[in-house]
Amino acid sequence: MIPLRDENPSRSVPFVNIALILANISVFIYQSFLIPGGAEPLFFRLGCIPYEFSHFVDIHPPALVPVPLTILTAMFMHGGWIHLLSNMLYLWIFGDNIEDRLGHLRYLSFYVLCGLIASLFHIFTNLNSQVPSLGASGAIAGVMGAYMVLFPKARIRTLLILVVFIQVVRIPAIIVLGYWILIQVLSGFAEFGSRTGSGIAWFAHIGGFVAGFVLITIMRKRRR
């Protein structure tokens, strides 16, 4: 299932959500085309490396910012076009409604908090990994968790692919997002402890989703 758009219009212009999307795209263009030597060295200098947090060291090559801040810098870096575009699609579909409900500044705080918690989940489940974790997917998972709480019945236009059956259908958000988080949980535990995993930070997705699910009940504005 690939969500294409929701049928849940927001009442305000999602300035922060648009800014986040533009920031991610800008960083990707910079890391891909404007850095001598390519992006990979930058991944190790600005990506979130669990080993550095669990062992309190800055392994070579040294980070360009204090190691704790790499949790934040990693949220704006992506490993490729597919990684970037899939993340931005989900953020575009679900982020505007959460910003509408929280307000602009509160939404920004919510987004960053979800991303930080997602990274901590990844670190604690991969303590000795020296592979840098990149991407906004943990924070976006938090947005999706919040959407599931606030708008479970909202209709999502979804590209459904079942072998030879390909159709755009309208599916309630609770099913689309429930299916997504189920895949993350099953995949995460299937690869847990494996040295030959897919390289996807499943537990960052799970942690971000849970964070968004919980934080939205605390941070959302109460309506009369």
Image (cartoon, grey):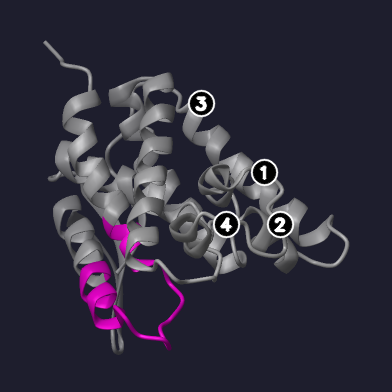
Res. 147 in view: no
Report the Cα–Cα distance between label 1 and label 2: 9 Å
Report the Cα–Cα distance between label 3 and label 1: 28 Å
User: Nearer the N terminus, badge 3 or badge 2?
Assistant: 3
Name the residue carrying label 3. Answer: 15
Relative vertical location of residue 190 with respect to residue 17 in this rendering, above or below: below
Q: Which image quadrant: the C terminus?
A: top left
Q: Which residue is mark 4?
A: 57
* Magenta residue span: 184-206
Mark 3 lies on a secondary structure that is helix
Q: Earlier in the sequence, mark 3 or mark 1?
A: 3
Q: The residue under label 4 is which amino acid type?
A: Val
Residue under the point 56% across and 59% down: 84
Image quadrant holding the N terminus, namely: bottom left
Tell me how far mark 4 sits from mark 1, CA to CA: 13 Å
Question: Relative to 213, is 67 on the left or the right?
Answer: right
Nearer to us in this view, 153 or 206:
206
Real-space Cα separation, disc 3 to disc 2, in angstroms? 35 Å
Q: Name the amino acid, label 3.
A: Phe
Instruction: Classify 10 Å Cα crowding around label 2: few (below 14), some (14-19), many (20 and above).
Output: few
Q: Residue at x 34, y 60 (%)?
A: 124
Q: Nearer the viewer, residue 103 or 126?
A: 126
Query: Label 1's element?
Result: loop
Of mark 4 and mark 1, the one earlier in the sequence is 4
Asked whether the beta carbons under mark 1 and mark 2 sit within 8 Å of each other, the answer is no
Number of residues whose C-alpha sits closer than 10 Å to that of mark 4, classed few (under 14), some (14–19) or many (20 or more): few
Mark 3 is surrounded, within 10 Å at the Cα level, by few (under 14), some (14 to 19) or many (20 or more) other residues, namely few
Give the residue number, with chain letter if any, for mark 2: 62
